[in-house]
Image (tube, rainbow, N blue to C red):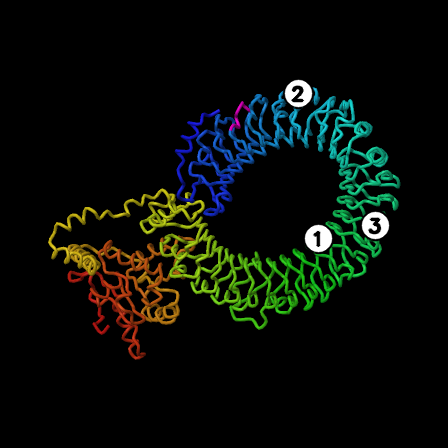
Amino acid sequence: MLPAKLLAILLFVCKDIKAFSLKNCIVHNMNDHAMSMKVLCYKMNLKQVPKEIPEQVNNLDLSENQIRNLWIADFKCMSCLQVLNVSQNCINFIEQGTFTILGSLRVLNLSNNNLTVLFSNMFYGLTNLTVLHLGCNNIKWIESAAFANLTSLNTINLTLNKLLSMSSLKPVFRVEALKELHIAGNNLKIFSTEDIIQMSAVLEGLDISRNPFSVINITNDVFDDLVSLDVSFSGVNEYISWNINNASFLRGIKHLSLGGMSVTSSTILTIVKSLIKTSLESIQLNSLNLSSVDNVTAEICLRQTLLKVLNLQSNKYHTIKEGVFNNCLNLNHLDLEDNGLYEVDEDAFKGLTNLSYLSLAQNLLPTVPNATRQLSFLESLDLSFNCISEIKAQDFEHLGKLKYLNLTGNKIIKISSSLFKGLYSLIGMNLENNLLLDISELSNSLYKVEFLMLCRNKLSLIQKNTFINLVSLKILNLHDNQISDIEEGAFEGLKNLKILFLGSNKMKRNALEKDIFKGMTSLRQLQIFDNHLAYESSVPLKTPPFRHLKSLAFLSINSQHNGMQHIPINFLEGLDSLKEIHAGNLAIKYLDPKTFSYTPNLTFLDVSNNALKVVSKDMFLYLPDLIELHFNKIGIDSLDFFRNTSTLSNLKHLRVAGNQLNVIHEDQVIALPSIKFLDMRENPFSCSCDNSWFLKWSLLDNKTQVIYFYDYTCAYPPNFKGTKLPNFNASSCIFEFDFYLFLSSSSSVAIVIIVSSIYHFWRWHVFYAYYLFLASVYDKRQLKKPYMYKCKYDAFISYNRHDEDWVINKLLPNLEEYYHWKLCLHHRDFEPGKAILDNIVDNIYASRKTICVISHHYLESEWCSKEIQVASFRIFDDYKDVLILIFLEDLPVRILSPYHRMRKLLKKKTYLTWPKHVEENNLFWHRLNMALQTREQKEDDNPVIPHLLINETN
């Protein structure tokens, strides 16, 4: 027992966890009420309990790791913990006092570990613990005070340990509040109540199954309040000595499991006879090799007149003759599953007037047995996985009270309206996994049916009025058929349908162009995933397919067929109530922002695994209520579409894993004020100062969890490739200005003003001119050296995709075809599979010149900005002026980056403006051609400031 002083110290040293980006765990329900926080750390190869788990945690899952020891400090701050799962580890030691602080814990799972002894006070402090799982360990001994002070413990599971004798279980039986005890599979050979000195007065359920008992002695009344006893799969060599001195010792028993025991049918009868004075209501006799000739059932029912549930599953009742169940007058649940049953006598169930549930599943029945027609009170009939190929009209006409019919896994080819007459009470019918080729109009007797399963059949056509009589139907499952056509009016009458499954079929767009969903005003969920829907453009449809589904809240159109490259603008028209849409794996190349103008209440959007690459921020104008967004693997390289977006104030979950993101900017995240859950795995991040803000925010923010952040890997720059992003030292990115401010304050006011002005307004001018001057001086010293540098291309063309038409139709024909220059274009000459940034750097340095085609779109592009930076830095690397700017439109100097401004200011001869008059075009191309010309060096050549024949008319 830990002293109160030590407990106070433990509470004092607890630290409030400020951030939720945990190294090996995921937090659920963060920032909500503390009683609902769940932390998942399973399958993380953990060697110890993580230190950074939030102290507000309510449910902690540490299962399937490699933890060997539990220490007193592991849970010292988790006073709110109610559920702890440390199963499937390698735990062989628990320090005394480990659970002292966990006074709120209700469930503790220590199963599948290597515990060998339960020491005294091992669980001290768990005063509210109700469930303790210790199964699948190597427990050989339990000390007398192991469960001391566990006053609320009502369930203990010690299955599959090594407690070889009843004496080793004495501390368990003494637990005062114990209601349920599992000691199955402990290799116990003798079970005797004489070894139980003290017993919980409230014990109701006892599982002693799967032990090799040779003797079971019940010689006193310690179990007189026991309700459930499981002795299944016990004994060896078909012999168990079963002794009950007085039947009243088990007078409270209601549920008895004897299945799979190594005993003969006569022994079973002996056991049942010994329980004649009990209140037995349910008996499990499965897996005992019983057959009709054993006459066990009739004898049991004769002696146990209160018996209601009889399980004969997995025996050898190949045939059932009349009289087998003659004495089972009160039986209401009979299970004959998996008996190899192929014949049932017509009067086999005669007299079972109270039977409400009958299972004949997994047998060899060729038809529906005539015997079932006599069960007029039957409510549930399971005929699944037999050999039934045909249903007759008279098979069910007498089952007027039947509510559930299961015909799954048979060989039924066709059903018609006449087959189910008389089933006026039927609520659910399952016909999945048959060979149905056709279904016609179903009987009007099925007007109460609420769910109908027709999945995994061979249906190709759904005809008009097929379901018109199923006016109460709420769930219709047509998943995984071969449906290619649905006639208009096929779903007519289904005004109460809530869920419709049409996934994994062969429907094409023409199937949806009919009014097949007309009248389905109550439909809430529609699944049409994995079909063959294909649209070649975003052109609006004449008849939007879902325009009548005013109540639809869930739509799934995701597919593995990758044929839906576009979504028509009005594809979602009419879905005013839509909350959730799944549109992944569709090969979508472009999403028109107006597509979601018809779904103003959307809260969940998943368009993962598409080829979008570009996302318009205007799309979010129509999604003010969006809570969860999945953009995994869509090819985006930036989150700029979130910038200056004010409509995503409710977004809490964002997944953008598997893209090309390398830098995350502050304004991109600030636009999402409610974000709680962020998934950015498998992106090529940059270990640079550009990511310093994102790095700090991910580690310290206490509102947003960047899941698996400690696994994020850098791809740039090359010397940091493979480095974990959290390991990047961003301290060098933070400038300390205190010392410089001190020096500047001691200077005169005039100097401060001059220096500040130069730094603020002209620092890029001075920087650029300085390096050009150095390049010029260096170049003069190299005039006499032979010119050895050769390039693969004459020019690298840097442009935005919006200006691609001008580049392809004007620039290329003039420079490549007329002037015979060799140009490098990213869409044509980049090496496939190579990183984008690596392609840019390699090809710019493999070109003599870099031509930048400048427009508004160019200035907004992150990649274009990188290209002009690389070309500008090359001036300083190679001491050559290699940059030429072409302005396609007039742009204010204020919107140009420093690189563009410096070029325009210092090198007027190295930029051109696309003429506004056609007659000036020839002169433009002549000037550009002259700019590209490079002669072999002579004594008067200057490679840094070449004598271009471009005048100042620009």
**Amino acid type at image mark 3:** Ser
Q: Nearer the viewer, residue 501 or 885?
A: 501
Q: Residue 123 in magenta? A: yes
Mark before the other along the chain sequence, 1 or 2: 2
Looking at the rendered image, the disc whose residue lies closer to the viewer, 3 or 1, is 3
Per the image, the residue denoted by label 2 is: 197
Badge 2 marks a residue whose secondary structure is loop
Which image quarter: residue 445? bottom right
Which image quarter: residue 235? top right
The answer to whether residue 632 is left or right of residue 813 is right
Badge 3 marks a residue whose secondary structure is loop
Badge 1 marks a residue whose secondary structure is loop
The answer to whether residue 484 is left or right of residue 291 is left
Per the image, the residue denoted by label 3 is: 376
Q: Nearer the viewer, residue 289 or 829?
A: 289
Q: Position of residue 202 (x, y in %)?
A: 66, 30
Q: Residues within 10 Å of mark 2 (few under 14, many from 20)?
A: few
Residue at point 67%, 21% (across, down)? 196
Looking at the rendered image, the disc whose residue lies closer to the viewer, 3 or 2, is 2
Say if 705 sits above or below 787 in the image: above
Mark before the other along the chain sequence, 3 or 2: 2
Say if 444 sits above or below 80 in the image: below
Q: Is residue 259 something one can see in this rendering?
A: no
**Amino acid type at image mark 1:** Glu
For marks 3 and 2, give the CA distance.
51 Å
What residue range appears in magenta? 118-124
Looking at the rendered image, the disc whose residue lies closer to the viewer, 1 or 2, is 2
Q: Residues within 10 Å of mark 1 (few under 14, many from 20)?
A: many
**Amino acid type at image mark 2:** Ile
The answer to whether residue 535 is left or right of residue 854 is right
